[in-house]
Amino acid sequence: MPSSTVPDPARDAAVRARALGTLSGLAAAVALLAVLPACGGGGGGDVPAAAPPAPVPSPAPAPAGPIAAQMTVPTPVGYDAERLAAFDRLNEIRLSAGLGMLAQSTRMDQAAQAHAEWMVANDSFTHDEQPGTPGFTGADWAKRDQSFGYVPVEGAEVLSTTSVGAAAGVDGLVNAVYHRAALLAFEPDDVGIGWTAGSAANVTMPLVIDLTRPGTDATRGMGQMAQASIHGVSVWPLDGAEGVPVRMGQEGPDPVPVQDVSTLGTPASIMIDESRTILAQSFVMRNHVTGVVVATQTLTYGNDPNFLVPHSFIALVPLAPLAPATRYDVAFSGSTTDFGSTTQVPLARTWSFTTGTP
């Protein structure tokens, strides 16, 4: 289940208090006091000239914007095989989608690991911890990160429970529409990963991933850009992808509440950076061979029943499982708008993918 950030403060306060973890960075201003020497007369002597004041150093320029996409990151330390596999798979997915890699934060690792163990200890698969329960470290993911010394700016936490391994858990998360929006956000540059082999009645080998940017770093706290090669637009499944699942999987909450989530197909999606809003005029999926249009529901910031889709993301959700071993063509036509602007910039993308065999 995802816990993600959206841009509308009123909407956040009203309906996302539990799912959202946005923190504001605090800047400390230092006042420099110039001490002037007092001049005194007497004795008829010359009054010595005061020394000129020392020049005040120019402040460091504020970062102009996000850093370039992180194409390499330091080798993680302290991971067991499962957490390393999840780290590697997540960054493999992000690189293939034209995004930057996520660097390990050992402080967020501790928060994520503590929450994985809390879920097993309390037999509760949830983002929210209750004070007084065994292993409590924070009510939500952002507070848990803070308790271990990391100050997050925006970002998200995603959870998975699976018996087939943490890397497979990442694959399942990116196939689910809300989790995908979190994992493929352009801006996060750090990640913390928790996993345990422990299980309880309602929790099996939970995987916890926190991804965000540091509020204590003026440069990296601006986030990162996408790779130049995608021209500011990331699509999923990738163009030419093969072996794509025919079903979305057990997404929670259900993006189409009137329908059982297990009957939904793998969504196609398009994403831009958070400084812009994306709007769709047409978003269509077709069977490549027959040309038949797939019955879908377009999921946007404006119509998402669960208020989890960010303004920079649009998904096309098939209302039935896709056919196995079948190629599908996707066509998007719409526009983007920069914050503070009313100018709509046309955007069009076409791509295709092929499903696997269940």
Image (tube, helix red, strand yellow):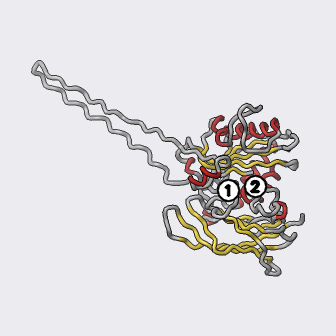
Image height check: is 326 above or below 174? Answer: below
Identify the secondary structure beneath mark 2: loop
- The answer to whether the residue labelled 1 contacts the one labelled 2, judged by CB atoms less than 8 Å apart, is yes
| Spot occupied by residue 288 in the image (x, y as percentages of width and height) | 80, 78
- Pick the front one: 166 or 240: 166
| Spot occupied by residue 214 in the image (x, y as percentages of width and height) | 59, 44
- Pick the front one: 100 or 209: 209
**Residue drawn 69% across and 46% down?**
210
| Spot occupied by residue 209 in the image (x, y as percentages of width and height) | 73, 46
Residue situated furthest bottom in the rendering: 290
Three-letter amino acid code of the residue under disc 1: Leu
Identify the secondary structure beneath mark 1: loop
Image height check: is 348 above or below 160? Answer: below
- Packing grade of label 2 (10 A; few <14, some 14-19, many >=20) is some
Residue 308 image label: 1
The numbered mark, 1 or 2, whose residue comes first in the sequence reads: 2
- 61 vs 43, left or right, is right
- Pick the front one: 204 or 31: 204
Say whether residue 178 is visible.
yes
Three-letter amino acid code of the residue under disc 2: Pro
Q: Quadrant of residue 254?
A: bottom right
Say how many tags the image has.
2
Mark 2 highlights which residue? Answer: 253
**Residue drawn 65% across and 51% down?**
16
| Spot occupied by residue 162 in the image (x, y as percentages of width and height) | 85, 49
**Residue drawn 26% across and 30% down?**
36
- Locate the C terminus and report the quarter of the image it occupies: bottom right
Residue situated furthest left in the rendering: 44
Image height check: is 14 above or below 227? Answer: above
- Pick the front one: 215 or 203: 203
